[in-house]
Image (cartoon, coloured by chain):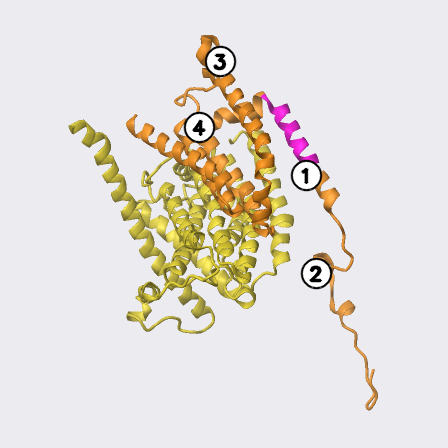
Chain colours: A yellow, B orange
């Protein structure tokens, strides 16, 4: 009986504890990311943004949560009830499930699996189902149009994201996320004879891919300027039109969890994960998780700025960008990077 | 080992139940969603068998891309449920025939390894030890080193099929306005703006 406890019960409890800790931290972080998003947006437009609830509006997200939780969820009479309620659950569960493999620091991943990056890619390709199911189950025109748009959009941009990831994997030689971060300790900077620094990270060596990845991740998460699935000026709110109260909140939560995930994926693939920007003692004393969160915040800041000052794309331009610009660039870069690595013997 | 068996039975049971529901559910969209659930559980079974790469690729390719297009098409169709139901019995023999053939093939494949120890040995050989080579690298060896020509030929066949499908269905519709980014960018004030002096009291 003692063996049963130490082999099954204890690891399970430990895993549940770790998962809960990560989720609580993540949800708190998302609450403040939402606020930061609105504040940055407001600052660009010379407004004050949310500033009433709590000091500087710091409790705004919690007030919104409370408001949404207390409202009545309305299910349209013509809706397919089961799928209508399943859709937000799918969206939020998948968005949170991907966080299992993200390494926040050396060895700080709940599941440090060999195919970590493929796992993230696989689960985030499934996120489109939440949107499609919501659009179809609502049994209404605007949500359905939004769902169709988003299905095409997300599938298109996954292709270029996939190729960008392949270029990074070629330089790293592993599918494990921790290995990807550790491989960035040495890079372009050390080849030039400089000490370990932020010049070693992949963003410099693969700069065009960094840009393609950033823009594709905006499209993948339906962020402005690619928020056509919910374009409020033409589709009212796209696939979310019929949703209210808690189901709506779950969509919002899933959306921001996916955004945070892509921010941290950018950090891991291009910005050196938990590594400090300079290999000096003072910066090495700061825990890696702080660097990780700072880098994620930096990427999110760029996401928020793009939302504030880039106008929405037209749908055919969006498709043109995905298929005629990003796909050839990323495909060519896979070939070029593979050739360079093979001919120089760096791989 | 106990946990593995537990997860195996969960995945296997859900996979079979949802595969049954693909056929049995009345609404085609529900059928597709159950099909996706079946894929998902099959990926879980792959994971348990140690084929982590295959599991993830199954999710990316089948669930993430193929099934999305499937769902897309089924949702857009205007399906008359009554008409579909009326044809069920007509097609039942064909379905049964396909089922019997699949069952026979499964019996041949699995039965062979039970009957002959030689076959069982061969089945066990191609899988390298996980400690020596991860199965992503092992698959890469097979596809890109050992059988690279076959892999390239398969790619060419798919490319030809894709181009063929596009050629057959592409129709240039003259009435649709298209955007030509190059001409837009090349526009300058000289070509775009015309200045005219208009006399008072007269139009242009």
Side of A132 where A281 appears, left or right = left
Q: Position of residue B85 (x, y in %)?
A: 56, 43
Q: Earlier in the sequence, mark 1 or mark 4?
A: 4
Q: Disc 1 sits on a residue from what chain?
A: B
Q: Residues within 10 Å of mark 2 (few under 14, many from 20)?
A: few
Specify the quadrant of the image occupied by residue B16: top left
Q: Residues within 10 Å of mark 1 (few under 14, many from 20)?
A: few
Q: Are marks 3 and 2 in contact (CB under 8 Å)?
A: no
Is the residue at mark 3 from the same chain as the one at mark 1?
yes
Q: Magenta segment range?
A: B147-162
Q: Give the residue displayed 59% in from the left and 60% down from the top.
A: A313
A305, above or below B33, in the image: below
Residue B5 painted magenta: no
Is the residue at mark 1 from the same chain as the one at mark 4?
yes
The kind of secondary structure element at disc 4 is: loop
Side of A57 where B178 appears, left or right = right
Q: Residue furthest bottom?
A: B201
Circle 2 sits on which residue?
B185
Separation of marks 3 and 2 at Cα, in angstroms: 67 Å
Q: Earlier in the sequence, mark 2 or mark 4?
A: 4
A45, above or below A297, in the image: below
Q: Residue furthest left?
A: A2
Circle 3 sits on which residue?
B112
Q: Nearer the viewer, mark 4 or mark 3?
A: 3
Q: Nearer the viewer, mark 2 or mark 4?
A: 4
The kind of secondary structure element at disc 1 is: helix
A41, above or below A83, in the image: below
């Amino acid at each position: 009986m003692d063996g049963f406890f130490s082999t099954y019960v204890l690891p399970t409890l430990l895993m549940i504890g770790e998962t809960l800790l990560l989720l609580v931290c993540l949800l708190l972080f998302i609450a403040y990311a939402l606020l930061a998003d609105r504040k940055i947006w407001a600052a660009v437009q010379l407004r004050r943004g949310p500033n009433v609830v709590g000091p500087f509006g710091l409790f705004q997200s919690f007030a919104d949560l409370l408001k949404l939780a207390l409202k009545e969820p309305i299910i349209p009479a013509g809706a397919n009830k089961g799928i209508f309620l399943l859709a937000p659950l799918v969206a939020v569960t998948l968005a949170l499930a991907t966080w299992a493999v993200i390494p926040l620091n050396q060895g700080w991943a709940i599941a440090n699996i060999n195919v970590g990056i493929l796992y993230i890619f696989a689960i985030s390709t499934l996120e489109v189902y939440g949107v499609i199911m919501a659009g179809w189950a609502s049994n209404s025109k605007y949500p359905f149009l939004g769902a169709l748009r988003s299905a095409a959009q997300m599938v298109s941009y996954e292709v270029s994201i996939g190729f960008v990831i392949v270029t990074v994997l070629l330089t790293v030689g592993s599918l494990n996320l921790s290995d990807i971060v550790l491989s960035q300790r040495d890079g372009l900077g050390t080849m030039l004879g400089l000490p370990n620094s932020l010049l070693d990270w992949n963003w410099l060596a693969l700069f065009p891919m960094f840009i393609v990845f950033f823009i594709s991740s905006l499209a993948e998460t339906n962020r402005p300027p690619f928020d056509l699935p919910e374009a409020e000026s033409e589709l009212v709110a796209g696939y979310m039109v019929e949703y209210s109260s808690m189901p709506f909140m779950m969509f919002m939560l899933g959306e921001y969890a996916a955004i945070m995930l892509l921010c941290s994926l950018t950090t891991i693939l291009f910005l050196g994960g938990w590594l400090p920007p300079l290999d000096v003692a003072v910066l090495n004393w700061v825990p890696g998780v702080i660097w990780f969160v700072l880098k994620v915040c930096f990427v999110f800041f760029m996401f928020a700025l793009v939302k504030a000052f880039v106008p929405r794309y037209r749908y055919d331009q969006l498709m043109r960008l995905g298929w005629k610009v990003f796909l050839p660039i990323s495909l060519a870069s896979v070939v070029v990077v593979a050739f360079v690595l093979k001919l120089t013997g760096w791989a | 080992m106990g946990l593995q068996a537990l997860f195996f039975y969960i995945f296997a049971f859900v996979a079979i139940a949802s595969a049954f529901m693909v056929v049995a559910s009345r609404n085609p969209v529900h059928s597709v969603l159950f099909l996706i659930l079946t894929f998902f559980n099959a990926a879980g079974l792959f994971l348990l068998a140690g084929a982590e790469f295959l599991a993830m690729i199954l999710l990316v390719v089948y669930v993430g891309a193929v099934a999305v297009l499937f769902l897309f098409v089924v949702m857009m169709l205007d399906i008359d449920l009554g008409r579909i139901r009326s044809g069920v019995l007509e097609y039942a023999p064909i379905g049964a025939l396909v089922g019997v053939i699949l069952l026979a093939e499964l019996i041949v494949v699995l039965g062979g390894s039970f009957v002959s120890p030689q076959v069982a040995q061969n089945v066990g050989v191609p899988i390298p030890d996980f400690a020596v080579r991860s199965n992503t690298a092992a698959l890469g060896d097979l596809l890109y080193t050992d059988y690279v020509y076959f892999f390239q030929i398969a790619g060419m066949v798919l490319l030809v099929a894709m181009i063929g499908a596009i050629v057959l269905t592409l129709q240039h519709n003259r009435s649709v306005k298209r955007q030509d980014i190059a001409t837009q960018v090349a526009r300058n004030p000289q070509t775009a703006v015309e200045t005219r002096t208009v006399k008072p009291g007269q139009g242009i």
